[in-house]
């Protein structure tokens, strides 16, 4: 199974930008569709963004579309989440997740489809 480690979280002001990274090890990174999820205090985990094995297909939650960009570098075994125009409602622990798929273009916003998760990184954007 692939191991995932997130980094890049922190405390930022509303309107600022932040880039999260998810480093993968243990298995061939390009075999996995990837996703970002987040969980705010007292709320359920929710989908943020997903990217296919090749990086060709991406998908976003409506709340972040136009502000966040997901990308990956298979040569570096790393996925990224560029977050711009951060809002207080973006405050959460952000998790990356991996789903092994034969379909080269597969993406999913369903957390049940992912079988490997990182430990999470905190993003805080106070009001």
Image (cartoon, helix red, strand yellow):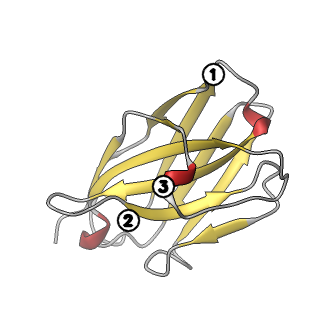
Most foreground residue, 61 or 44: 44
Quadrant holding the N terminus: top right
Q: CA distance from mark 3 to mark 2?
A: 28 Å
> Percent position (x, y) of residue 78?
65, 36
- In the picture, residue 52 is in which quadrant? bottom right
The residue wearing badge 1 is 25
Quadrant holding the C terminus: bottom left
> Percent position (x, y) of residue 120?
36, 39
The residue wearing badge 2 is 16
Q: Sort mark 1 into few (<14), some (14-19) or many (20+) by Cα contacts within 10 Å.
A: few
User: On screen, 8 above or below 94?
Assistant: above
| Residue at the spot 70% in from the left edge and 22% down from the top edge | 27
Q: Sort mark 3 into few (<14), some (14-19) or many (20+) by Cα contacts within 10 Å.
A: some
Most foreground residue, 56 or 67: 56
User: On screen, 100 above or below 44?
Assistant: above
| Residue at the spot 83% in from the left edge and 52% down from the top edge | 103
Query: What is the secondary structure assignment of the residue under circle 3?
Result: helix
User: On screen, 49 above or below 76?
Assistant: below
Left or right: residue 3 versus residue 18 is: right
Judge whether residue 11 can be spotted in this image: no
Query: What is the secondary structure assignment of the residue under circle 1?
Result: strand
> Percent position (x, y) of residue 113?
57, 52
Mark 1 or mark 2, which is nearer the start of the sequence?
2
> Percent position (x, y) of residue 4?
52, 30
Looking at the rendered structure, the number of numbered marks drawn on it comes to 3
Query: What is the secondary structure assignment of the residue under circle 2?
Result: loop
Disc 1 to disc 3: CB gap under 8 Å = no
Mark 2 or mark 3, which is nearer the start of the sequence?
2
Left or right: residue 101 versus residue 12 is: right
Q: CA distance from mark 2 to mark 1?
A: 30 Å
Q: Sort mark 2 into few (<14), some (14-19) or many (20+) by Cα contacts within 10 Å.
A: few
Numbered badge on residue 111: 3
């Amino acid at each position: 199974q692939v191991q995932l480690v997130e980094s890049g979280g922190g405390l930022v002001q509303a309107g600022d930008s932040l880039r999260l990274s998810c480093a993968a090890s243990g298995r061939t990174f390009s075999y996995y569709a990837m996703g970002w999820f987040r969980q705010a205090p007292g709320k359920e985990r929710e989908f943020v963004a997903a990217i296919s094995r090749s990086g060709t297909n991406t998908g976003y939650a409506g709340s972040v579309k136009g502000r966040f960009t997901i990308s990956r570098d298979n040569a570096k075994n790393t996925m990224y989440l560029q977050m711009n125009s951060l809002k207080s409602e973006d405050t959460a622990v952000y998790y990356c997740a991996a789903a092994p798929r034969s379909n080269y273009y597969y993406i999913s916003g369903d957390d049940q489809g992912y079988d490997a998760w990182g430990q999470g990184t905190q993003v805080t954007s106070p009001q």
